[in-house]
Amino acid sequence: MDLNSLESANVWRYLGIKIMHDSEGRAGVHVKDSENLRQVYGAMHGGIISTAVDAAAGVVVNKCIGRDYAASTVELKVNYLLPVVNSDIFAYAKIVKRGKQLIVTTVEVFDDLSNVVAIGIVTYMVKSKG
Protein backbone atom coordinates (compact mmCIF):
# COMPACT_ATOMS: atom_id res chain seq x y z
CA MET A 1 0.00 0.00 0.00
CA ASP A 2 1.12 3.53 -0.71
CA LEU A 3 1.52 5.07 2.73
CA ASN A 4 0.24 8.42 1.43
CA SER A 5 -3.14 6.76 0.97
CA LEU A 6 -3.26 6.18 4.74
CA GLU A 7 -3.02 9.93 5.36
CA SER A 8 -5.79 10.56 2.84
CA ALA A 9 -8.24 8.22 4.62
CA ASN A 10 -11.26 9.97 6.13
CA VAL A 11 -10.44 9.40 9.81
CA TRP A 12 -6.80 10.37 9.37
CA ARG A 13 -7.76 13.59 7.57
CA TYR A 14 -10.44 14.43 10.13
CA LEU A 15 -8.04 13.98 13.07
CA GLY A 16 -5.05 15.46 11.23
CA ILE A 17 -2.89 12.34 11.65
CA LYS A 18 0.46 12.59 9.85
CA ILE A 19 3.10 9.92 9.23
CA MET A 20 6.54 10.65 10.65
CA HIS A 21 9.80 9.00 11.77
CA ASP A 22 11.74 9.55 14.98
CA SER A 23 15.49 10.16 15.27
CA GLU A 24 16.06 6.38 15.38
CA GLY A 25 14.13 5.86 12.14
CA ARG A 26 11.05 4.30 13.78
CA ALA A 27 7.87 4.92 11.82
CA GLY A 28 4.86 6.43 13.48
CA VAL A 29 2.30 9.18 13.53
CA HIS A 30 1.81 12.68 14.91
CA VAL A 31 -1.52 13.97 16.20
CA LYS A 32 -1.71 17.71 16.80
CA ASP A 33 -3.49 18.79 19.98
CA SER A 34 -6.79 20.57 19.54
CA GLU A 35 -9.76 21.50 21.69
CA ASN A 36 -11.90 19.10 19.63
CA LEU A 37 -9.80 16.10 20.71
CA ARG A 38 -10.17 16.65 24.46
CA GLN A 39 -12.47 14.96 26.94
CA VAL A 40 -14.57 16.83 29.51
CA TYR A 41 -11.64 17.29 31.96
CA GLY A 42 -9.37 18.90 29.35
CA ALA A 43 -7.01 16.01 28.59
CA MET A 44 -6.77 14.38 25.17
CA HIS A 45 -9.49 11.74 24.85
CA GLY A 46 -8.32 8.15 25.28
CA GLY A 47 -10.03 7.18 22.06
CA ILE A 48 -7.80 9.59 20.15
CA ILE A 49 -4.70 8.10 21.78
CA SER A 50 -5.97 4.61 20.95
CA THR A 51 -6.52 5.68 17.34
CA ALA A 52 -2.93 6.98 17.20
CA VAL A 53 -1.69 3.61 18.50
CA ASP A 54 -3.60 1.77 15.77
CA ALA A 55 -2.48 4.25 13.10
CA ALA A 56 1.22 4.00 14.03
CA ALA A 57 1.04 0.22 13.96
CA GLY A 58 -0.77 0.43 10.63
CA VAL A 59 2.11 2.40 9.15
CA VAL A 60 4.75 -0.21 10.02
CA VAL A 61 2.52 -3.12 9.02
CA ASN A 62 1.68 -1.61 5.64
CA LYS A 63 5.36 -0.85 5.00
CA CYS A 64 6.12 -4.50 5.78
CA ILE A 65 3.45 -6.27 3.71
CA GLY A 66 3.71 -4.44 0.40
CA ARG A 67 1.07 -3.63 -2.20
CA ASP A 68 -0.23 -7.17 -2.82
CA TYR A 69 -1.60 -7.59 0.71
CA ALA A 70 -4.14 -5.91 2.98
CA ALA A 71 -4.09 -5.74 6.77
CA SER A 72 -6.90 -5.42 9.30
CA THR A 73 -6.67 -4.80 13.03
CA VAL A 74 -7.88 -7.85 14.96
CA GLU A 75 -6.77 -6.89 18.47
CA LEU A 76 -5.80 -3.63 20.16
CA LYS A 77 -4.69 -3.09 23.74
CA VAL A 78 -3.69 0.27 25.20
CA ASN A 79 -2.33 1.15 28.63
CA TYR A 80 -2.73 4.84 29.46
CA LEU A 81 0.17 5.94 31.67
CA LEU A 82 -0.20 9.73 31.92
CA PRO A 83 -2.85 12.25 30.91
CA VAL A 84 -2.05 14.30 27.82
CA VAL A 85 -2.79 17.96 28.55
CA ASN A 86 -2.00 20.76 26.08
CA SER A 87 0.34 18.55 24.07
CA ASP A 88 0.59 16.88 20.68
CA ILE A 89 1.19 13.14 20.70
CA PHE A 90 3.73 11.07 18.77
CA ALA A 91 3.19 7.31 18.44
CA TYR A 92 5.98 5.03 17.18
CA ALA A 93 5.55 1.35 16.36
CA LYS A 94 7.70 -1.68 15.71
CA ILE A 95 6.93 -5.18 14.54
CA VAL A 96 7.49 -7.79 17.23
CA LYS A 97 6.46 -10.91 15.26
CA ARG A 98 5.41 -11.58 11.70
CA GLY A 99 3.66 -14.86 11.11
CA LYS A 100 1.91 -16.23 8.03
CA GLN A 101 -1.37 -14.49 8.80
CA LEU A 102 -0.77 -12.32 11.86
CA ILE A 103 1.61 -9.46 12.62
CA VAL A 104 2.06 -8.28 16.22
CA THR A 105 3.31 -4.76 16.91
CA THR A 106 4.16 -2.68 19.95
CA VAL A 107 3.62 1.06 20.12
CA GLU A 108 4.90 3.82 22.40
CA VAL A 109 3.09 7.16 22.61
CA PHE A 110 4.92 10.31 23.72
CA ASP A 111 3.88 13.85 24.56
CA ASP A 112 5.73 17.08 23.65
CA LEU A 113 8.08 16.61 26.63
CA SER A 114 9.03 13.05 25.54
CA ASN A 115 7.07 11.48 28.41
CA VAL A 116 5.68 8.03 27.58
CA VAL A 117 1.94 8.61 27.98
CA ALA A 118 0.67 5.27 26.64
CA ILE A 119 1.83 1.93 25.32
CA GLY A 120 -0.02 -0.47 23.09
CA ILE A 121 0.01 -3.85 21.42
CA VAL A 122 -1.77 -4.20 18.09
CA THR A 123 -2.31 -7.40 16.10
CA TYR A 124 -3.14 -7.34 12.40
CA MET A 125 -4.44 -10.06 10.13
CA VAL A 126 -2.83 -10.04 6.70
CA LYS A 127 -4.52 -11.36 3.57
CA SER A 128 -3.62 -11.35 -0.08
CA LYS A 129 -5.60 -8.85 -2.17
CA GLY A 130 -5.83 -11.39 -4.98
Image (spheres, rainbow, N blue to C red):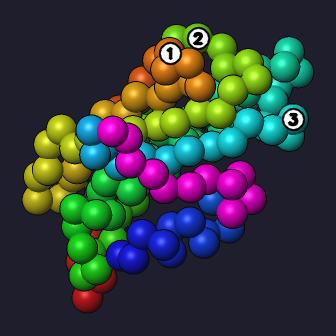
Residue under label 2, please give it: 82
Judged from the image, the secondary structure of the residue bearing numbered disc 2 is loop
Residue under label 1, please give it: 115
Three-letter residue code for mark 1: Asn
Q: Looking at the rendering, which quadrant does residue 43 occupy? A: top right
The residues colored magenta run: 13-23
| Number of the label disc, if any, that sits on residue 78 | none
Callout 1 touching callout 2 (CB < 8 Å): yes
Badge 3: residue crowd in 10 Å (few <14, some 14–19, many ≥20): few
Q: Earlier in the sequence, mark 1 or mark 3?
A: 3
Residue under label 3, please give it: 35
Where is residue 1? Give x, y as percent: 36, 76
Determine whether 108 is above or below 17 in the image: above
Q: CA distance from mark 1 to mark 2?
A: 8 Å
Where is residue 101? Give x, y as percent: 18, 59
Does residue 16 belong to the magenta stretch?
Answer: yes
List the single residue furthest toward the bottom: 130
Three-letter residue code for mark 3: Glu
